[in-house]
Image (cartoon, rainbow, N blue to C red):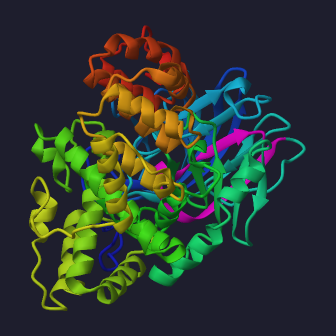
Amino acid sequence: MTSCAQPKAEEPIVYSYVEEPHSYAKPNNAFIKHLKLDITVDFETEVISGKATYDIKNNNSTQIILDSKHLDIEAVSADGKETEFSLGAKDKQLGQPLTITIDKNTKQIEILYKTTKNTEALQWLKAQQTADKTNPFLFTQGQAILTRTWIPIQDSPQIRLTYEANVQVPKGLMAVMSAKNPKEKTENGLYHFKMQQPIPAYLIALAVGNFDYKAISDRTGVYAEKSMLNKVHDEFSDMEKMVTAAEQLYGDYAWEQFDVIVLPPSFPFGGMENPRLTFATPTVIAGDKSLTSLVAHELAHSWSGNLVTNATWNDFWLNEGFTVYFEMRIMEAVYGKERADMLALISRQDLDDELENLKDTPNATKLKLDLKGKNPDDGMNSIAYDKGYLLLRTLEETVGREKFDAFLKQYFKAHAFSTMTTDKFVTYLNTNLLEKNSVTFNTDEWINQPGIPKNQAIITSDKFKKVEQVLQEFITTDKINKDLTKDWTPQEWVHFIRNFPTTMTTDQMKDLDTAFNFTNTTNSYIQMVWYEQALNHDYHGNNVDAKMENFLTSVGRRWYVESLFKAFKRNDRMEDALKIYEKSRPNYHSVTAHTIDALLGYEPETEAALGN
């Protein structure tokens, strides 16, 4: 948000918020600057209730509009006096506009409200759904437009606000937020939070459960349930090294603290970059730090996404393409170029898979999206992440790493705590990198055209070439030299399994399973790709069907779950898929459930199911 020169008295201020299709807010008229929450978390009724107080900037408007979805709005006041409010027509994706009457001098509004059984951001978990199985658990997931389902808010990424909160939870449980957090439980279950840097609403986050904290350094540490705490601490012990590497690349870390909380397995994403406190899936706890690129990714979001935020969800690639690029640079700095090359090549292969999936809808492969009338989740795929990364890597190779690093460091500094549109970025890129270095680059083709331009960075990995040689030898001879595989990383195993040819026989699948016990691996990434190949090749050995069903009913990470249900569908096993989904769906967060509902054509019996 930027403003013009100082206006004359009584003259309206002109703000440069852009129109966007996923919020009812009219921030050029009035917007929230600061939020104070006073709320109670009730596990018996599975309701959050309380009061939200908002300091607002009012541009001579007689109303302010917030986003609300599946909320019970009880009362509204403006500057301490009860005021009129109305909820508009319901939209399946957007919810309802909450229009509040104010006058041109109004500085503060207050809303009494409750969440409902349909609230999609919240997942209430019973004790048996947690690691320790002793206490219930609650977590929120706000991205992209779900914060409006647990707080009435202007739920647009371009509207940044500070916040504070008083949160009452049952005694014996801890509450943490995307803010300054406690390190120990309080006696009375009351917790106080403050986020002093302005953030978009989708980054307001809350988790409540019986977990503890263990520091890694003065500014990094982990939260986890007791049975997992030491394991999580060991897995993420390189966090301080990652923060140091990131700062050396692109400037100081702006959020003081970088902690990670490992949530129950129903968490729908690998990680969520909530500032100061990344939410993470337990599926990355592999015991060998092999999947900790996820931590590097969420850390990178502290610059790309949290510090400089996509103004609308049509510009989502500005969050994720930059973050994948930064992730790879952190991984290279901490673990070496070979590992980073393997991760980058997996990213490239994921992009090829996505391009194939979207071949009938080529416009969906553009970086700049048009998501009007659609759920912004529709744009959260490999195009934003991996095509965005490939663009930035190609730019790096075109101008040279030293110049590109200087450009990115200045980009983050110049736009800290602000939002960015694709058009604005292109202008900045042209002025501060391309024209400055007399470089011609087909930026428009990369951003506004389908597919991948010819001038793309070519990503290779010597280790993956050796993996392919081992696989080819096995396909040709049915023999495998286990000495060649004894030091393979999980990334090498993933590459090996993902590249099985369609001609692979069930006998060959059985031989590999016997040799390497893939069906019983404890590495979640290898599990996912192996189960997918079992479906592709009609392999049923080693009790793989039961293991796969257990995986799908115990893990809610959307990427994993969607990949396997797609494989069921692709291989004409819809009946089996629906039987498993009937069992697994109650364990999924609404984000995952909505995706699989659409994939399988599943219609829940009641609208209340999982917040539908």
**Image: magenta residue range:** 189-210
Q: Is residue 84 above or below residue 271?
A: above
Q: Is residue 494 above or below residue 57?
A: above
Q: Is residue 80 above or below residue 577?
A: below
- Residue 11 appears in which quarter of the rendering? bottom left
Q: Quadrant of the C terminus?
A: top left
Q: Nearer the viewer, residue 505 or 198?
A: 505
Q: Position of residue 376 (x, y in %)?
A: 31, 42
Q: Quadrant of the N terminus?
A: bottom left
Q: Position of residue 440 (x, y in %)?
A: 9, 82
Q: Position of residue 420 (x, y in %)?
A: 31, 66
Q: Is residue 36 left or right of residue 339?
A: right
Asked whether residue 16 is in view, the answer is no
Q: How many marks?
A: 0
Q: Residue furthest bottom?
A: 437
Q: Residue furthest top?
A: 605
- Residue 568 appears in which quarter of the rendering? top left
Q: Is residue 205 magenta?
A: yes
Q: Is residue 176 left or right of residue 72?
A: right
Q: Position of residue 487 (x, y in %)?
A: 53, 59
Q: Mostly what secondary structure, the magenta segment?
A: strand
Q: Nearer the viewer, residue 333 or 450?
A: 333
Asked whether residue 585 is in view, the answer is yes
Q: Is residue 372 magenta?
A: no
- Residue at x 27% of width, y 79% of height: 396
- Residue at x 54% of width, y 36% of height: 517
Q: Nearer the viewer, residue 335 or 408?
A: 335
